[in-house]
Image (spheres, rainbow, N blue to C red):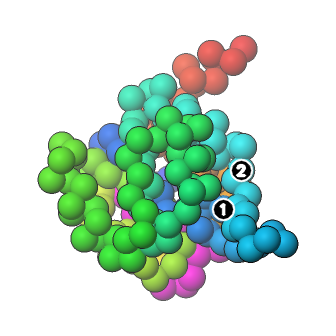
Amino acid sequence: MSAPNLKITSRARQIRLLLLDVDGVLTDGRLYYGNNGEELKSFNIQDGLGIKLLQRNGIKVGIITGRSSALVARRAEELGIDLVVQGREDKLTALEDLLVTHPYQMNEIAFLGDDLPDLAVIRRVGLGAAVANARPIIAEHALWQTTTCGGAGAVRELAELLLQAQDKLESTFTDYL
């Protein structure tokens, strides 16, 4: 994880909601199809634990993705993520719609993305972040970038950054000793 500067730490302290893209962030961005045409996705276990750690520490986690997939709904359910927006290519409008019913300010939201559909949200939220293998324009506009690629622990890396900035990381680790 790259060391956060004071601006990043200051922003990370305010985060109450982490929103995630799916393809290229929670997954490696590849689409797999079985012999019968069924779609398959691979999710990282460390990312899953990172999401659980955030939830245990009072940070809500949600998903905004342009594609629709029963697999995403299943993974979200496994992780206790009840804020799931699928099939919305205009993610900024999806976020604005979400804020009508969820009491968050933009400065309280972090978003982790990787490609052009994520750009407007990354530019608008309090902490816009990009995975290590994000497209260059996404990395350019992100406030912070993981050192880990999407689908390989990038969500966990951001989770630990948020917990560290909020002085909750050490106590979280202590729970496992």
Look at the numbered disc 1 and give the secondary structure of its residue: loop
Q: What residue type is labelled 1?
A: Thr
Q: In the image, what residue occupies the spot 15% across and 53% down?
A: 100
Q: Position of residue 167 (x, y in %)?
A: 45, 29
> Which residues are drawn in magenta?
127-137
Residue 139 shows up from this direction: no
Q: Where is residue 85 in the image (x, y as percent from the top left)?
A: 38, 58
Compare residues 54 and 166 and report the one nearer the observer: 54
- Mark 2: give few (<14), some (14-19) or many (20+) Cα within 10 Å: some
Label drawn at residue 27: 1
Q: Of label 1 and label 2, which has the lower sequence position?
A: 1
Q: Tell me if label 1 and label 2 are in contact, CB under 8 Å.
A: no
Look at the numbered disc 2 and give the secondary structure of its residue: loop
Label drawn at residue 44: 2
Q: In the image, what residue occupies the spot 66% across and 72% down?
A: 29
Which quadrant holds the C terminus? top right
Q: In this view, does 6 lie above or below 136?
A: above
